[in-house]
């Protein structure tokens, strides 16, 4: 069905159609709009179903329908009001009567940049909360006190600041802070969803900095909050403490790869520094081992995506030794492990470069070396070797390749 046909059917039955949310925001900001979400006013659900029998109903608390419009699957909802009666995002009673206006629906939304509607077919902007002003001035402000009724909106505001390079106003930061207690009750999948989207932003550190500013970092990501104040040797880390270092490496990694697992691994690479006792500071001996313990506890508290976990585990374990390996056998083992890890050798190298400001030669030429490893002809293995001996022979061939490579590299 075309959008024109959809609108006409609604209008012919005295209903109103609006596009709302992100699509409108992106259009105003001159970004490429993505999925369209529609809101219908002045129409009952019964009449809607009669007009569009092909619409697929989803959601339990309130009706949302999926329909193919202009060859895209779109969400269609009815204007609604919400009243807070319990914990979290499920603690609402919802009213979606046909007499509700689009302004009623926009009032319940989170931030003003998302509380703008485009009336169809006239394409008139409905902007009762000055969202257009906020978009043009790159500000994130809560629509009303309803903002804090869904605590994950605090994470969403911080994530939007990271995505769009906006600032969050002081009143909204106070409302974010009021979400702290209820955030403890939120399902882990909602937290992970916001973290994933924040890590996808151009500058992910903004997300964590605003959570810290709103006193929410210890509630949402205590593993990252623990890095604050953990000093480091200034000669190696002029940027500041372990938190500042982690934010720096995260943003550097984000400039080089869009892979979310790699960005998470960069975020997690120094988790162990949060456990360093004050008496040891500014040094962090053994933080690789303690970092794995922190990651394991994080995964028990909030189940992390498997690829994130495996990637972060590898980086935590190997990021310190990677820059200092000299023995060909150890180098061969690391290269093969990095290649097999879900993170991959390219992303591993990106993080090591961000952390050390340079790469060891074997990582710079990792693809060439691995290609030579894979070209080793197993048929040349002595016929009398068996079992483990074959593996030892193969390992020695790799060592030979690396010895030759390192000699040639040093000669140049």
Image (cartoon, grey):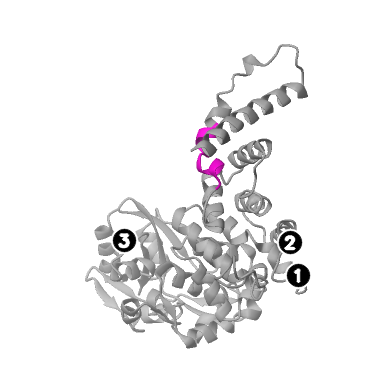
317, above or below 270, in the image: above
Q: Secondary structure at mark 3?
A: loop
Q: Is residue 87 visible?
A: no
Q: For the residue carrying disc 1, how many other residues have a C-alpha within 10 Å: few (<14), some (14-19), or many (20+)?
A: few
The residue indicated by pointer 1 is 280
Q: Does the magenta stretch mainly form a helix, a strand or a loop? A: helix
Q: Earlier in the sequence, mark 2 or mark 1?
A: 1
Q: Give percent across and percent down for residue 192.
A: 59, 62
The residue indicated by pointer 2 is 285
**Marks 2,1: beta carbons within 8 A:** yes
Q: Is residue 366 magenta?
A: yes
Q: Which quarter of the picture shows residue 187?
A: bottom right
**Marks 1,3: beta carbons within 8 A:** no
Decide if residue 289 is on the left or right side of residue 335: right
Residue 16, label in figure: none
Q: Is residue 3 visible?
A: yes
Nearer mark to the viewer, of 1 and 3: 1
Q: Give percent across and percent down for residue 44.
A: 40, 70
The foreground one among 49 and 166 is: 166
Q: Which residues are magenta?
A: 360-370
- How many tags in the picture? 3
């Amino acid at each position: 069905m075309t959008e024109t046909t959809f609108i006409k059917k609604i209008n012919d039955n005295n209903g109103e159609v609006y596009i709302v949310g992100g699509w409108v925001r992106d259009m105003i900001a001159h970004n490429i709009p993505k999925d369209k979400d529609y809101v219908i006013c002045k129409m009952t659900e019964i009449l809607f179903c009669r007009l569009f029998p092909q619409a697929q109903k989803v959601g339990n608390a309130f009706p949302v329908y999926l329909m193919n419009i202009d060859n895209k699957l779109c969400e269609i909802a009815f204007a609604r009001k919400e009243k807070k009666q319990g914990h979290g995002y499920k603690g609402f009673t919802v009213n979606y009567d046909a007499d509700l206006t689009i302004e009623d629906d926009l009032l319940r939304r989170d931030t003003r940049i998302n509380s703008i509607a485009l009336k169809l077919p006239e394409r008139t902007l409905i902007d009762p909360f000055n969202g257009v002003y906020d978009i043009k001035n790159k500000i994130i402000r809560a629509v009303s006190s309803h903002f804090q009724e869904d605590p994950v909106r605090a994470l969403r505001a911080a994530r939007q600041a990271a995505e769009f390079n906006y600032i969050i106003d002081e009143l909204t930061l106070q409302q974010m802070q009021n979400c702290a207690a209820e955030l403890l009750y939120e399902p882990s999948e909602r937290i992970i969803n916001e973290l994933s989207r924040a890590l996808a932003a151009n500058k992910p550190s903004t997300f964590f900095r605003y959570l810290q500013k709103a006193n929410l970092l210890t509630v949402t990501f205590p593993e990252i909050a623990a890095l604050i104040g953990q000093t480091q040797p200034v000669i190696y880390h002029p940027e500041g403490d372990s938190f500042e270092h982690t934010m720096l490496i995260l943003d550097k990694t984000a400039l080089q790869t869009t892979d979310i697992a790699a960005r998470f691994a960069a975020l997690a690479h120094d988790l162990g520094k949060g456990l360093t006792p004050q008496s040891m500071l500014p040094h962090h001996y053994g933080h690789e081992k303690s970092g794995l313990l922190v990651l394991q506890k994080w995964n028990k508290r909030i189940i992390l995506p498997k690829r994130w976990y495996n990637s972060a585990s590898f980086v935590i374990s190997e990021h310190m030794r990677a820059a200092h390996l000299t023995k060909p056998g150890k180098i061969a083992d690391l290269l093969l492990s990095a290649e097999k890890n879900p993170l991959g050798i390219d992303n591993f190298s990106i993080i090591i470069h961000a952390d050390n400001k340079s790469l060891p030669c074997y990582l710079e030429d990792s693809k060439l070396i691995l290609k030579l490893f894979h070209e080793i002809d197993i048929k040349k293995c002595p016929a009398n070797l068996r079992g483990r001996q074959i593996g030892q022979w193969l390992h020695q061939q790799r060592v030979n390749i690396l010895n030759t490579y390192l000699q040639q590299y040093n000669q140049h």
